[in-house]
Image (cartoon, rainbow, N blue to C red):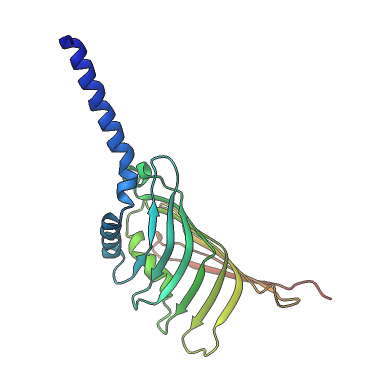
Amino acid sequence: MTRRRWMMLALGSLLLLLVTTIAAIPWALGTRPVRRWMLARANQTLAPAGIEFTAIRLSWFRPTRLTNFVLRDAQQDQVVASPDAVWDRNLRQILFERPRLGTFNLKRAVLDVERRADGSIDLYEAIKPVLGKNPRTDLHIRIHQARLRFRNAGQPVPVTAERANLTLDIPAAPQPIAWNLELENPAIRNSATLQIGGRFERWKAANTLAVEVRRNTGPGP
């Protein structure tokens, strides 16, 4: 074998090894030891709140999928649980496009949200550390056909909905945080649909908060 041919073979083998290693990174990140490390880092950021998931599937080209995703508040109460959560970021975007965090789509989720006596809402407080003060942070959450229980301090009976749709947009500055929540109990005849929308101007000195509530009554008999 000539020296030139040997060098070409060695270079080809090195490139093949490099490509194989890069391709295997998403698989390695999904293994149990790395998953535990990722959860530890995420929970350091969210503390005293935290997240859990039993499996993560990463790809260089496809969205990230989380199995049995759970978000817990500062008291470690379960706030959001979804058996199948899809994050529209691939591994390259996660590594190199932060703080553009993309969209989380939580499927078949269960929401257990509490408004405390001081007016704070545990769902917002749980994700608040992710927002930070970076004006370039961009995050969107979509929850479709979830089940909701909303507890309010001082009210013994919670608000429940068998079907809840939530859109939460936290765009980069100077755009405001915006949300829309639709609540419905389709099993109850002629039940109304409750829509709660709002926006929060967090980048303005006045921190303006606007909330709109609409009730759409179902058709009569």
Quarter of the image with the C terminus in it: bottom right
Task: Give 214 or 143, whichever is nearer the viewer.
Answer: 143
Image coords of residue 114 (percent x, y): 46, 78
Residue at x-position 23% and y-position 27%: 14
Give the percent coordinates (x, y) of residue 66.
Answer: 42, 57
On the image, the x and y values in percent for residue 128 come to: 36, 65
Residue at the far left: name it: 3
| Viewer-nearest residue: 102 or 5 | 5
Name which residue lies at 52% across and 66% down.
109
Q: Residue furthest right?
A: 221
Task: Give the image quarter of residue 37.
Answer: bottom left
Q: Quadrant of the N terminus?
A: top left
Q: Is residue 47 left or right of residue 215?
A: left
**Numbered circles on residues, count:** 0
Q: Position of residue 5 (x, y in %)?
A: 21, 12
Report the residue at 29% width, 65% height from top: 43
Point 37% across, 53% down: residue? 137
Between 129 and 85, which is closer to the camera in this rendering?
85
Is residue 153 found left or right of 6 in the rendered image? right
Q: Residue furthest front?
A: 1
